[in-house]
Amino acid sequence: MRSDCASFRAALEAELVGKASGEKLAWLAWHEHLLACAPCRELLEKEEALETLLATLPEPKLPDALLRRVLARLRRERAEETKLEGLLDALEEEIRPPAGLAAGILARVAAERDDRLDALLALDREVDVPAGLAGRVLAGLSRERRKPRRIPWTYAAAAGLALVLFGRFLWTRTRLEAPIPPTPNVLVAHDETPPDPALLASLDVVEQWDLLMQDDVDVLLSTLGPADEALLDYR
Amino acid sequence: MNLVRTFIVALLAAVSILGRGASVQESPTLASARARWERFTPEQKERARDRYERFLAMSEEEREQLVESARRLRERSDRVQRELEEKRDPRLASLDAEGRRALVREIVEDESRALGARIRGELPENLLARLESAKPEERARFFRDFRVQQRDRVARFAIGVLGKELALPEDEIRRLQSLPGPERCATVLDLRKRLSEKDVRISGLPPGITQEQWDAWLELPPEEFFVVLQRYRESRIAQHGRDQGLRVLADAARPRAEDVLALADLAPGERLAKVHAERRARCTEALEKGKLVSASELAEIERSSDAEFFRAVRRLLWRSGATELPGVRPR
């Protein structure tokens, strides 16, 4: 890509950031670079076509019934906030929080909620939602909420049992199959300590230790296997 | 309902896990080791743990070789035990379990020294020097390195020699030479067995062997076939060596389990010293009467330790007694 291409495309990208429109892109059609660069002309045309297409799409809108329900729900929640305010007032009597703390918190919460509500209402234009969808969604949510908040102690008990059993299984496997433990010092702690399986697996070595470790190497040589011994004839 | 379902799931999981845990059985080898451990006295257990710690402190290569060597000694020990039990000797029956084990250990040690002395005669001098000057803990590693090198280089050469004698196609020889180390090593034994079979077809059975015996040997896997032929080769040297002197010496030097058994009532150290002294006297007499060495050489080996003395005798026997027999030629 040529350097002037890069410069043109940077300008195009700057216009596309945020809410682009056909008008905003129009001035770029007069960019000097386009006189000599077909690929960039083509790119601009594609972007303009895309913007035109996007402009023809309908704005999203909530159906009237859903809008009414949302507003009613918000009103109820605001009433609950009033109750919270009363509670905070009562508490204030008890613990004497800094003056205006509750009002500050409530104002902040309300402001944020209003902002969100405004954003939500701004979207309230024309979106086709299947009839009855909102009712089904709210009914489903309502059923979920009505379910008793059950602490799943049965699951916890089952998980605990499974953990204990799994731990026992792992311990058994480790005891039987562990090859060579990295910390052998445990072995010499008490004479009556059960032997480590890895020690038992190496018991041949331990029992033949004197033979294998003596100064005379003949016993070690005698352990050369038949196949290795056969190879000696070819050295 | 959910509660019931949860318990059923938990129960199934528990049964499954317990079932798996119960199915983890000790291997026969481990069970046998545990039984041996249970027989140890507290002092023996303490010593075993001490040795095990030293074993753990070794390198992986050293441990690998020691495990391999100890396994072979254990197999030898099991065989000696079986052979002794088959003899049903009353002297053996009179010994307690520990006494019998001590007897087996001595016979195994004796046999192992004899076998080791023979193998020593076939090893390159530089390897021997290296092994003998190394610390006991390091020897296992040098020994293993030697085996690995043999399996790599010498096995390829051996396959080339044997393959040509068996008239194998060049491609097949190259394929066998490129097998992984342990398989390549096993291939050498397989080719040797096939060569022995071919030799016998051409030259007839080895002396003293019937067709039935030979057929039974051919049924053995290559490794066992090799061991049987080595024993046969040694027995032929003892019975039909090039001259009478060598045959007498071979018989005098042969480790005999019966010698050890005859002295079963003695303490282990005393018994071993007596067995060695008697064998040494027999060998010295055979060397002298058979005029197998010069007077000065005889005087020199008489001054040496038991180990050096028997090693010299073994080397003499193996090198001078090798005979060309159908089916048992080394190459």
Image (tube, grey):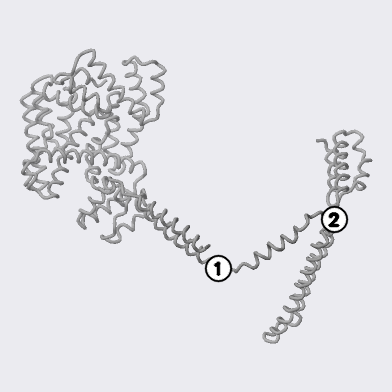
Work out whether residue B88 or residue B307 is closer to the camera in this orientation and state it: B88
Instruction: Judge from the rendering whether residue B136 lies leftward or rightward of residue B89; answer left or right.
Output: right
Query: How many numbered discs sit on the rendered protein?
Result: 2
Report the quarter where the C terminus of chain B lies: top left
Residue B277 seen in the figure: yes
Q: Position of residue B210 (x, y in %)?
A: 15, 20
Chain-order first, disc 1 or disc 2: 2
Q: Which residue is mark 2?
A: A126
Q: Residue B207: give its label.
A: none
Helix, strand or loop at mark 2: loop
Up the image or down, B254 lies above or below A174; here it is above
Q: Position of residue B100 (x, y in %)?
A: 13, 46
- Chain under numbered label 2: A
Name the residue rendered at 20%, 30% in the picture. Answer: B118
Q: Which residue is mark 1?
A: A151
Work out whether residue A179 or residue A161 is closer to the camera in this orientation and state it: A161
Work out whether residue B286 or residue A23 is closer to the camera in this orientation and state it: A23
- Tell me the kind of residue under disc 2: Glu
